[in-house]
Amino acid sequence: MLRVDSYRDPLGVALRYPQFRFMGSKHRLLPWLYEVFSSIPFHTALDAFSGSGCVAYLLKAMGATVTTNDHLHFAYHIANALVANPGRVLGTTDLDRLLRENDEAPHFIEDTFSGIFFTPEELRFLDNVWANLGLIGDEFQRSLVITAMCRAALKRQPRGVFTVANGKAARYHDGRRDLRLTLQEHFIESMELLRSVPYDDGRPHRALCMDVFDLPIEYDLVYLDPPYVPRSDDNCYIKRYHFVEGLACYWHGYEILRSSKVRKIKKKYTPFSYRRTAIPAFDQLFHKFAESVIVLSYSSNGYPDLEVLISLLRRYKSRVEVFEAEHRYHYGTHDRVRPDRALVREFLIIGA
């Protein structure tokens, strides 16, 4: 079991967190977030839309007892594996058991996605690891395996998104190392990398996979980074990452849209993703956490407008401050990504 004295250099600890190729990740903003969080007294913290988990990891490194939440399975497993996990990792023997060929493994992933993503052998590998996952009894270790599978799939897939099938994705094969490695090689590398991330600080952190409005409310600080109304359908998380979301739960509970060329899954509803419901949802969210210090992350390309969110927050908070930084988001790795799509103003709206 690992132990880390993170209080000596919390930002240094947080910056070792692995990067995931997720739209909207705040990893590059961690130094700025650390500076802002440092001005707020708190002992308990909630990251209510945890995504890649890097902000929750920062809050943990700053000495808080952290609860993470996300309604997506892959985000839950990342946080459970890397933030809530008190240092329970897997050894070489465990990895050998996961990689051992299982004659009873189903062929669901191979049958569903052959010719769409990866090679048949790589899809069979994912089926096999999922079949062997039952040999791992510890919940944190299981989440580590699922996180490694998801990370491997993201790195192996051209551009890290699952919007185009193998044929069209071939145009993005530029010879980079991530595209030369097999999915199994990426998985083994990810398992080794992730071993060094979880640590025990003696505090009872936890990860949840719930609707944000069903969460408990007793936190000193609540960090909110909800899925703002997308400017285009291409910015939808499920559209981009449906494969890793399905992989994180072996597609249990999801309807696969067979008419879709890439076998998308039916989106989970969230009121934050629709113009007609976003403003009432923010009002409800601010009301729910009115007793906590609220830190809302907002980008200039989001909806509602900044002024609307400030006005809503002032209904429940006597003091509202706004901090601003320039930031370039990850939208893709190819040359045709338009700079104006990626460069935004990032805001932190704090209600205390």
Image (tube, rainbow, N blue to C red):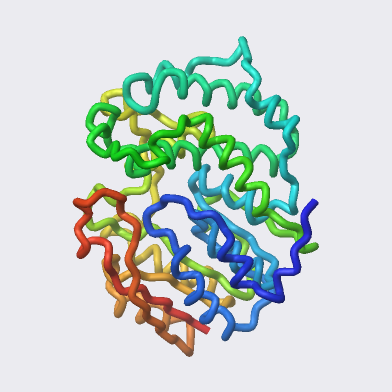
The residue at 36%/73% (across/down) is 346
Q: Is residue 214 visible?
A: no
The residue at 59%/35% (across/down) is 188
Looking at the image, the residue that sits furthest to the top is: 103
| Image: 23 above or below 144 | below
Left or right of 130? Residue 92 is: right
Q: Position of residue 275 (x, y in %)?
A: 26, 59
Q: Position of residue 304 (x, y in %)?
A: 29, 68
The residue at 76%/58% (across/down) is 200
Query: Which is nearer the eye, 244 or 257?
Result: 244
Number of numbered labels in the structure image: 0
Query: Which is nearer the eye, 89 or 136?
Result: 89
Q: Is residue 123 visible?
A: yes
Q: Quadrant of residue 331?
A: bottom left
Q: Position of residue 321 (x, y in %)?
A: 43, 86
Q: Position of residue 82 (x, y in %)?
A: 63, 52
The residue at 70%/69% (across/down) is 6
